[in-house]
Image (tube, helix red, strand yellow):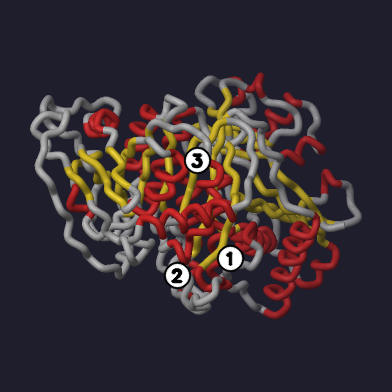
Amino acid sequence: MKFFAFSAFFLLLIAVYGGRSALGGTNAETIPPQVVGTFYPADKTELRKTVDSLINEAPNASFQGELTAALVPHAGYAWSGKTAAHIYRLLKGRRYDTVIIVGTGHRVYVKGAATVAAGSFSTPLGEVPIDEEAVKKLMGFAPPGQVAPPGRVAPLVQNLPEAYKGEHSVEVQLPFLQVVLGNFKVVPLLMNNVDTKVASQIGSALAQLMQSGKTLLLVSSDLSHYPDKETARIVDETSLMALQRSYDDPEYFLEADRLLMAKGRGKNLVVTFCGEAGLLAALYAMKELGGTGPAGAQSRLLAYTNSGELAGGEPGRAVGYSALIWTRGGLPPPKRGLNEMQRKTLLALARETLTRALIKGEKPESALWKDPAFNLPSAVFVTLRKKGVPRSSSLRGCIGSLVPNLPLAEAVEIFALKSALEDSRFSPVTPDELNGIGIEISILSPFRKISSASEVKPGQGVMVGQGRHTGLFLPQVWEDIPDKKNFLVELCRQKAGLPEDCWKDPRTEIRVFDAEAFEEE
């Protein structure tokens, strides 16, 4: 569990009016504006003019497919309004009966999500009714294998109107929605517990509500808090890239956050996403709806800035803002990979790391890299080969990681050194050998489990395993062992330490993967 940051905003008292809701015995709540006059104009005419102006000035972006969800900032309109307007310009003229807003609980800790069971939210533009039936479904949702006790609220989503006292993350989205959608109902949620089990369960409940195309999910969250503007941009571009590359693995997004926080604490980085809990739930929801990535929802970044880059902002203390959408039913995204310059930079980094370590005795230093791609969690292997000899006998060291638990550039540094000094099959590389050794880097894709060896295709990386005995061949090994049977035999025998026909054993787990491989010229 992670601690969540409290924002220093005015705490206003909430007015609760009488009334009975359709839920039977639950008081309907009229939640009055909490940050009116501070985050956005209090005057109705001025507010409408402000929102219209922001939306009309936003680019009219186009997209394919169905708009399913969006990430939108929640700061004051003077700071994040222009960024948020990119989302609301897209919504103009569209119809959604219900908008689920998953906001950040800045003031009251909740284990799952806090909602308001019945009533409405009020802004200077009028009242927005709560979708009581949808909220009732969420409050009655029980995780798989569990049954909510009759007459009692399931613990995942609780009716906690008090959590909305002084809270702005849901409220600031409402005037925009009132202008672009007109009549709609809202499902308000506040989250701040970054727990994968809780997020996955709430995501499952949200997915059920989102089965209809008339329901939109908004994640209300700002990005990095309080580093300098240059660091904020690096951190935010990295985390947004991780968000777009996470595919069916929300935990990848969390791993990126962990690595960024470790690098950024010395730079006054407090959080990467203040709405991380809600964002994680949204990722799980889209995963259940059909996955993210090529087979499901496609993410697209529309805008980014941070307060340190804006007029009047503090360059040394910034907050990041982004507008990002998820669509379904469009064309699959282009295949992502490193460009030629990035590849050359990483190969040069590996060469420099070996030179400094073997000749000067210097170890690489942990850093936050200016290129966001270099900060992404990556599973990497570094292979060293002797130059001028047949490839089949050229191997001089090869070590890496099967899981993406290090930033890409740092992984290259670490495994270049390990391949040179710690591969038990060879003696350590000496300084005199360096000029005669070539470097190859392989970045592994996520592993995919297959049912049998018949599904293995030449050119794929393959891993076999039984219990603690596992072995892996990179895709490049097919160049040395092109025959599939021989490939699998050597994988079982050489790498896994299992019988050579282990690939036929139904107890053997087989996984395949792809690799982006490149080497020095």
Q: Is residue 420 left or right of residue 405?
A: right
Quarter of the image for the N terminus: give it: bottom left
Q: Is residue 57 left or right of residue 121?
A: right
Rounded to the nearest angstrom, the CA distance separating label 2 from label 3 is 25 Å
- For the residue pair 335 and 519, the one nearer the viewer reads as 335
Q: Quadrant of residue 10?
A: bottom left
Q: Residue at x 29, y 33 (%)?
A: 131
Q: Secondary structure at mark 1?
A: helix
Residue of label 1: 234
Disc nearer the start of the sequence (2/3): 3
Q: Residue at x 19, y 34 (%)?
A: 154
Q: Amino acid at mark 3?
A: Asp
- Contact (CB < 8 A) between labels 2 and 3? no
In the rendered view, tell whether residue 239 sits above or below residue 211: below
Residue of label 3: 249
Mark 1 Cα-neighbour bin, 10 Å: few <14, some 14–19, many ≥20:
some
Q: Amino acid at mark 2?
A: Leu
